[in-house]
């Protein structure tokens, strides 16, 4: 028997369409897979791709599902939840995949109708592509999905969302909101900010150097631009949503970069090498943890 | 007929052993391939790997070749050239693969014995691995090799080194030293400095967060650590050799990062998106130029 009778994904983009594709392929997520969006173009494409049983722009209809998963950009999660929640049925579970928690947990918790549980999660998976065409059924395999249920959340509902991600191939872990946001600032938000910025810096160079940079992009720069190819609106929302923690992490990074600059300026070979070696230690541990 | 009667590589590491492997496979680089190094362990390994006809620790012997290619870390190029040059024969060519030019060109030019030409190049290729085991014959295929001959260098010698890199599969371009160093600061040295630093920043976090970062390393951070796995001594030398240009490029980057931080702090959505979009434009051009 599938985990849910019906599962509705609001916003079938990279993440949402991957969940639906997984559900379609395995048959174990829900009897009925629902894709809901406000964009007619997205809905047309989802119909063509054929990974949902019901394709609708009617949020009140989608809200009838046993499990409603909000997969819209971080900045739109709260508004979407406000539109969905009044139509949800007792016993149903609301979840989302917002990659920054901020005050989202307690805010949405306070809006829940009686009998509805809220168990958000953050699947740490993705590519630089977006939209319903970008998803694939194996996107979450061997990735982490971090669950961030509000305090006092229903254990049964937590178990069901945990199971949902496990059926998608992911490992799960339960974390408090603030720890989640500090970790993600370091492993994901700061790297993206730096990647966007280095492309911006290259773009600001003189025309002659800029043209040459484009001709000779070596591996270092090329890897950064791949990260920087990600969706601008999604990342703008993430940066704003995790502003305090992200800016604090950036400050630490800039201080470390200036420490390295100072060592280079002074030609202090030992200081430079020891900073480089510390980075390599992290890399080695990642390889041992099979994350690299 | 091969390009040279004999080609000596001083320092058969990632780059040098790849040139020798290419020469062994194609047979078009030289009749006799010579590998020279001061490390007995390296020489033993090179003998086992079998990609050179002559394996020696005798620099005066290696210096007898028609073409001598110095493939040691940037900081050791000048000293190696000083040891080699007195033994070189008229009509021979000295080259190197130093990835920072600085004052190397005019310095070595001034030391040349009569009849010896100096045509250095910088193959923009590599991996995060090093040593004679790390090389492979196709490393330079479809990569750029930037030639930086000193002013007034012999056109015939330039043509031969150009041909050498083309036989290795690379495209070549002739550039002045200072432009070379500004381009490489942007496309290679700064990305590596940032990658080392972000690993350092992660390493400096509290034990609890650091452990979690290692558990949940998402794609952004993981990509940085791959760059940061490169050889510390090589990068230390590069950073010091290109100090002035690199630190100036880093200053621009930090200013751009602080501009982004300011936009995030202010919640200025348009400013954030326009910075992200500029980065994406660079990415698109790279894809058009088939560099991504």
Image: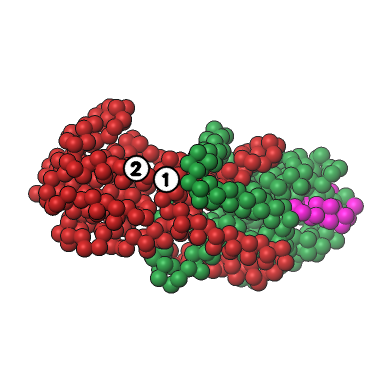
Chain colours: A red, B green
B35 magenta-colored: no
Q: Which mark is residue A76?
A: 2
Can you say whether B199 is above or below A215 in the image? Answer: below
Out of B28 and A211, give the one closest to the viewer: A211
* Segment tinted magenta in the rendering: B91-114
Can you say whether A53 is above or below B232 in the image? Answer: above
- The residue under the point 50% across, 56% down is A247
| Residue for badge 1 | A237
Residue B27 visible in image = no
- Discs 2 and 1 carry the same chain letter: yes
Q: Chain of mark 1?
A: A
Q: In the rendered image, which quarter is residue B55 located in?
A: bottom right
Residue A112 visible in image = yes
* Callout 1 crowding tier (Cα within 10 Å): few <14, some 14–19, many ≥20: many
In the image: residue B208, left or right of residue B242:
left
Q: Position of residue B163 (x, y in %)?
A: 70, 41
Q: In the rendered image, which quarter is residue B189 located in?
A: bottom right
* Callout 2 crowding tier (Cα within 10 Å): few <14, some 14–19, many ≥20: some
Say whether marks 2 and 1 touch (CB < 8 Å).
yes
The secondary element bearing badge 2 is classed as helix
Out of A29 and B123, give the one closest to the viewer: A29
Considering only order in the chain, which callout, 1 or 2, is on the residue closer to the N terminus?
A: 2
In the image: residue B137, left or right of residue A104:
right
Image quadrant in which the C terminus of chain A is located: bottom left
Q: Position of residue A202 (x, y in %)?
A: 62, 43
The extreme left residue here reads A1
Q: Which mark is residue B61?
A: none
The secondary element bearing badge 1 is classed as helix
Q: Position of residue B11 (x, y in %)?
A: 67, 61
The extreme right residue here reads B114
Q: Position of residue B91 (x, y in %)?
A: 84, 48
């Amino acid at each position: 028997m599938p985990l849910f009778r019906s599962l509705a994904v609001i916003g079938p983009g990279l993440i949402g369409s991957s969940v639906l594709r997984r559900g379609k392929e395995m048959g174990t997520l829900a009897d009925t897979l629902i894709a809901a969006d406000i964009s007619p173009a997205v809905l047309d494409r989802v119909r063509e791709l054929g990974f949902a049983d019901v394709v609708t722009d009617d949020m009140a209809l989608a809200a009838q599902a046993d499990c409603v998963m909000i997969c819209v950009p971080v900045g739109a999660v709260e508004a979407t939840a406000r539109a969905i929640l009044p139509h949800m049925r007792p016993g149903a579970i609301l979840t989302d995949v917002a990659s920054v928690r901020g005050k989202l947990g307690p805010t949405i918790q306070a809006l829940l109708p009686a009998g509805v549980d809220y168990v958000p999660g953050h699947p740490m998976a993705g590519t630089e592509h977006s939209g319903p065409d970008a998803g694939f059924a194996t996107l979450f395999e061997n990735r982490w999905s971090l669950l961030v249920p509000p305090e006092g959340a229903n254990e049964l509902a937590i178990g069901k969302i945990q199971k949902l991600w496990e059926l998608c191939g992911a490992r799960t872990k339960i974390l408090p909101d603030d720890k989640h946001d500090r970790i993600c600032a370091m492993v994901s938000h700061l790297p993206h900010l730096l990647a966007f910025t280095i492309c911006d810096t290259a773009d600001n160079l003189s025309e002659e150097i800029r043209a040459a940079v484009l001709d000779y992009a070596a591996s270092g720069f090329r890897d950064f631009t791949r990260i920087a190819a990600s969706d601008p609106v999604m990342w703008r929302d993430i940066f704003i949503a995790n502003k305090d923690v992200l800016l604090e992490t950036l400050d630490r990074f800039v201080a470390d970069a200036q420490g390295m600059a100072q060592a280079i300026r002074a030609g202090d070979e030992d200081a430079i090498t020891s900073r480089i070696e510390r980075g390599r230690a992290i890399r080695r541990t990642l390889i041992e943890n099979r994350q690299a």
